Amino acid sequence: MSGSRLTHLKRLEAEAIHIMREVAAEFRNPVMLYSIGKDSSVMLHLAMKAFHPSKPPFPLLHVDTTWKFREMIRFRDDTAKRLGLDLIVHTNQEGVAAGITPFTHGSSAYTHVMKTEALKTALSFYKFDAAFGGARRDEEKSRAKERIFSFRTENHGWDPKNQRPELWNLYNARIRPGESIRVFPLSNWTELDIWQYILKEDIPIVPLYFAAERPVVARDGMLIMVDDDRLPLGAGEVPETKMVRFRTLGCYPLTAAMESRAATLPEIVEEMLIARTSERSGRLIDHDEAGSMEKKKREGYF
Amino acid sequence: MDQHAPAGFVDYLARHEQKDLLRFLTCGSVDDGKSTLIGRLLYDTKLLFEDQLASLERDSKKHGTTGADIDFALLVDGLEAEREQGITIDVAYRFFATDRRKFIVADTPGHEQYTRNMATGASNADVAVILIDARKGVLTQTRRHSFIVSLLGIRHVVLAVNKMDLVDFSKEVFDRILADYRSFADALGFETLVPIPLSARFGDNVIERGEALGWYEGPTLLAHLETVEAARDTASGPFRMPVQWVNRPDLDFRGFSGTIARGTVRPGDPVVAAGSGRTSRVKAIVTYDGPRDAAVAGEAVTLTLEDEIDISRGEVIAAAEDRPEVSDQVSAHLIWMHDERLIPGRTYLIKSGARTVAATVTDIKHKIDVNSFQKLAAKTLDMNEVGVVNIATQEPIAFEPYATNRTMGGFIVVDRLSNLTVGAGMIDFGLRRATNIHWQALDVTKAVRAGLKGQRPVLLWFTGLSGAGKSTIANLVEKRLASLGRHTYLLDGDNVRHGLNRDLGFTAADRVENIRRVAEAAKLMVDAGLIVLASFISPFRAERQMARELFEPGEFIEIFVDTPLAVAEERDPKGLYKRARAGEIKNFTGLDSPYEAPEAPDLRLEGGAAAADALAEAVIAHLDRGGYLG
């Protein structure tokens, strides 16, 4: 065996770069879904590598539900500016006008209108024919079977039983007008790989990932951060200050914090290695019903 | 690192960064306990988290098949439909890691109709774990799985004899199964074959040794997976890199981005663009992390060259002194993956490296029964069948045999109309060197010949049902053209089927070949400067498209003689509908064989509504408008 064997992170990096270049070469109008989270940060870093010395030949798209943590929005704008990239921010204005919030309509209806519908509208409006997403196969059971190039119908639907076979590193990019492909360059990464890579490459991430004292309320066994005065407090609920951090960042009332003292990257990774709670349990949307992620994906959620 | 952290832990991370990656696939029949085995690996390497365990316990009660115990299979069967049916229907990828390695597992379904999924999972794996139920021993599926694993180039196999708890952990049972397996697997040429007796349900020999299997002296499954040296040595051997993307941020920089398929590259190395044969030297290996002294197979880089040579996506940059073969005809193993069968002669797209070219299967040498490994004669390949075929590509491609290099030898087949991936292939060897067939540059050109005749050559392609009136109209058009002093020729079923194509019948494959020959003959006639009229049912869009693509823009006019089936059948000029209805003729277009109407013909004639001479005049008028009549 030759001594030049690549480490697992090097192989994952090369695979992601290969995928991104295929998309840039084969599609007319690709876009990168940018959710501001750590996976998006890694995906964006890989895009910078893939096309260097050119800039990534596609814009970033952020679907803003208006319920993102304020630090996330700040980080998003700083990142786009720092890297000199086009950033498209899209909000479902009809949803806003209809007064849809996670509190008034429940997390399921809210997610459908402000995320799934908003995303579909944005993709159709800009006529994007390929959209990168940072999803990983280890996140959730239905993701484990998703292709790297995942075909979507004109209505953005996903048919898990009728996926194109995907062999070697040969991706079938052919679609008809109106159809599109969701592309997942981080498919084969695990959460630990993501953290190790952030550490190795020194990739900037939203400070919310690091433990700090923040105001939270305990609700259904989860710690919800009080990011602004839009969070309705129940009877007897008083925000208290705790040392917390986030393992995953979504919309603030739907994403729970965890108590932690991990304030540096090595400490986070160390905590990861002994962690006993998987990542998506910090997101309330997956608890709604069995197989709920598969259902959302069929409807066009990322 | 300026972050504060326990020093020992930072070392620990550094070690973890040095792990390598092993990709393996598991294959077995529906009840061999494959999902249970993977669930067990995930569970015992402690990669299950509390909430996943809680959900697993809940699901075990609801759907489980193991009574009160935890059903590990539920951990990996992802999609709702599978959970209900209790079977795995698609390739799923799982991840776990130990201190030595990170593992990616392709969990592939075992039953017959999903062979294509197994091939998909095997394409990126270096090791295969083939499961056998100790109670059942070697089954037909075992032979099939082993064959596909071997076909996709996996050289390292673990024979996991599972459910040993149900045969009293018997060494005799295990030995008998192993002997059965070796009796056919020796022919498949695996480099290593490691048989392991185990019980996935109770964990014996998965990670920990099983006490009841004390007679077994080999490694546990995990111990073997952690140490097996299965990675291909792609870093040695001549350099090859398919160009994915031409990197041009500004006029001063021109780089070629791609993933190295084989070998090592260094600045100063002499290289060649394999397709064009142009040579240069590597100027620099450009990466985001700075210039590199060398890069090896598997790395994604950008190369700049000393000379300005024309290289675009799909070209292969290769070592100048050791070039890959370039050919437009190859012999390959082909796995068909779609329920619409392969049609030899039909034009498909194949994607190989970063290159997509039109290609046809020109010959099926034989198909291989994946259960018995026997060679069988075949005219087509159905879903999940494997054949040895000759393939002709419209342009030459640079490749290496799949056995030498997976990236340079593997390709997928895409249907041009549905855009679906319908097959996957592995190149065995080239059939002739493309360099031998450079086109003869001719002095008397098509333009010269057409000029002598004072006309603009064109092909009028009449398509429609039998009895639609195609030949009648084409005849009238030819007479009118002759009266206008044009040089013409009419090709139709009658004058072609009795000579050029008399060896062809009316199966889908023969219809495709019929049209291909007609189109090629018409192309020569157009080249000779003639106005050609072709009158053929030509029921399939794909073949009409193939014919169109042989011609320059404006040289191919598709005329759809759109006569309703009822009218054509009523006319029945040759009595064919009557015979077909009586069952005397099979594969009759419009009855038991489909007619795919043109979606956007250049001219549509309502064959049921107007008289033939009026329709012929409409064709002449169309030609006049298009400037074909001068």
Image (tube, rainbow, N blue to C red):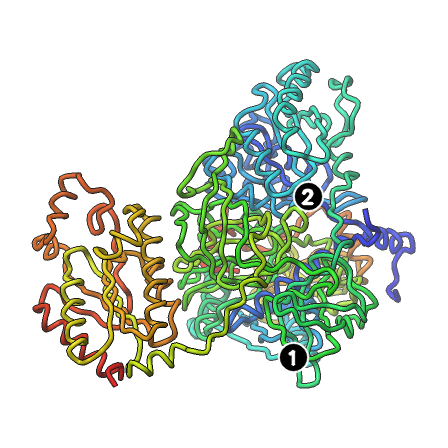
Q: What chain letter is assigned to the residue under label 1?
A: B
Q: What chain letter is assigned to the residue under label 2?
A: B
User: For residue B10, which quarter of the picture?
Assistant: bottom right
Point out the tag, 1 or 2, that comes first from the N-terminus: 2
Vertical side of A66 occupied by B414: above or below? above
Q: Residue at x 17, y 62 (%)?
A: B471
Q: Residues within 10 Å of mark 2 (few under 14, many from 20)?
A: many
Give the number of callouts. 2
Specify the amino acid type for callout 1: Arg
Q: Which residue is mark 2?
A: B126
User: For residue B197, which quarter of the picture?
Assistant: top right
Q: Which residue is mark 1?
A: B248
Q: Residue at x 47, y 70 (%)?
A: A123
Q: Position of residue A101 (x, y in %)?
A: 49, 66
Q: Residue farthest to the right?
A: B7
Q: Secondary structure at mark 2?
A: loop
Q: Position of residue B23 (x, y in %)?
A: 68, 45
Q: Are marks 1 and 2 on the same chain?
A: yes
Q: Secondary structure at mark 1?
A: loop
Specify the amino acid type for callout 2: Asp
Q: Position of residue B458 (x, y in %)?
A: 30, 74
Q: Is residue A282 visible?
A: no
Vertical side of B334 occupied by B462: above or below? below
Q: Is residue B498 visible?
A: yes
Give how far apart the Cα atoms at labels 1 and 2 are: 36 Å
Residue B355 located left or right of residue B85: right
Residue B421 located left or right of residue B56: left
Q: Residues within 10 Å of mark 1 (few under 14, many from 20)?
A: some
Closest to the observer, B48 or B111 = B111
Closest to the observer, B241 or B59 = B241
